[in-house]
């Protein structure tokens, strides 16, 4: 069985709430730099996604576009992208259900989403073999543009609480 990797990315820093509806908040200038740095870091770590599940909010779509641009510049092939309203207000169960529906030929799946869902999902999915220090960190929440990496030795439809290994949490420098 192929090793599957799930990368849970919190969107980059957005403009403050209140000026426009939350769903339409764009990235702030520092967030644009963060997102580009995420793409460079994912490429360097060998984590270019084959499939992307992206929330429909403006800030997540902009985050993915800047990550994609950096990945493409580094030679990564284009990923299959699915933008979903379901990820905007997703619960951990909603996120897991979307991941379970990913085709098994997707070796690396990137989810571009929101807090607290991305950190909570990382903690809930973490099972035996996880890095305990990383589990503690995700339970505290993750900052903007941070991503956690989980591994699954089986098919995506088997993704469930405690079924993956949480191996790292990172953010751009």
Image (cartoon, rainbow, N blue to C red):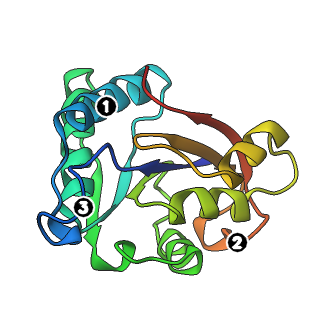
Q: Which of marks 3 and 1 is nearer the N terminus?
A: 3
Residue 79's label in the rendered image is none
Residue 15: percent from left, percent from top: 20, 50
Q: Is mark 2 on a helix, strand or loop?
A: loop
Q: Does residue 30 appear in the picture of this structure? A: yes
Q: Which of marks 2 and 3 is in front?
A: 3
Residue at x-position 55% and y-position 73%: 100
On the picture, is 34 further left or further right than 73?
right
Q: Which of marks 2 and 1 is nearer the N terminus?
A: 1
Q: In this view, does 172 lie above or below 130?
A: above
Q: Quadrant of residue 70?
A: top left
Q: Does residue 3 appear in the picture of this structure? A: no
Q: Is mark 1 on a helix, strand or loop?
A: helix
Q: Earlier in the sequence, mark 2 or mark 3?
A: 3
Residue 22: percent from left, percent from top: 23, 69
For the C terminus, the quadrant is top left
Rate crowding at label 3 as few (under 14), some (14 to 19) or many (20 or more) other CA atoms within 10 Å. Answer: few
Residue at x-position 19% and y-position 23%: 73
User: Label 2, on which residue?
Assistant: 160
Tell me if label 2 and label 3 are in contact, CB under 8 Å: no
Residue at x-position 82% and y-position 57%: 127
Q: Quadrant of residue 28?
A: top left
Q: Nearer the viewer, mark 2 or mark 1?
A: 1
User: Label 1, on which residue?
Assistant: 34
Q: Quadrant of residue 24?
A: bottom left
Q: How far apart are marks 3 and 1 (CA)?
A: 19 Å
Q: Nearer the viewer, mark 3 or mark 1?
A: 3
Could you say which is closer to the camera, residue 154 or residue 62? 62
User: Label 3, on which residue?
Assistant: 17
Q: Is residue 153 above or below residue 68?
A: below
Q: Residue furthest front?
A: 18
């Amino acid at each position: 069985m192929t090793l599957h990797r799930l990368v849970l990315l919190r969107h980059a820093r957005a403009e403050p709430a209140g000026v426009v509806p939350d769903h339409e908040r764009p990235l702030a200038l520092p967030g644009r730099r963060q997102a580009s740095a995420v793409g460079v870091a994912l490429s360097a770590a060998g984590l270019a996604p084959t499939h992307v599940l992206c929330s429909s909010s403006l800030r997540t779509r902009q985050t993915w576009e800047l990550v994609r641009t950096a990945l493409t510049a580094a030679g990564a092939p284009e990923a299959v992208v699915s933008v979903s309203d379901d990820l905007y207000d997703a619960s951990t169960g909603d996120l897991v259900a979307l991941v379970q529906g990913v085709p098994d030929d997707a070796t690396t799946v990137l989810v571009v989403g929101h807090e607290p869902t991305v950190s909570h999902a990382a903690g809930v999915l973490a099972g035996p073999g996880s890095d305990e220090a990383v589990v503690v960190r995700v339970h505290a929440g993750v900052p903007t543009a941070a991503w956690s990496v989980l591994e699954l030795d089986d098919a995506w439809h088997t993704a469930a609480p405690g079924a993956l290994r949480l191996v790292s949490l990172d953010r751009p420098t």
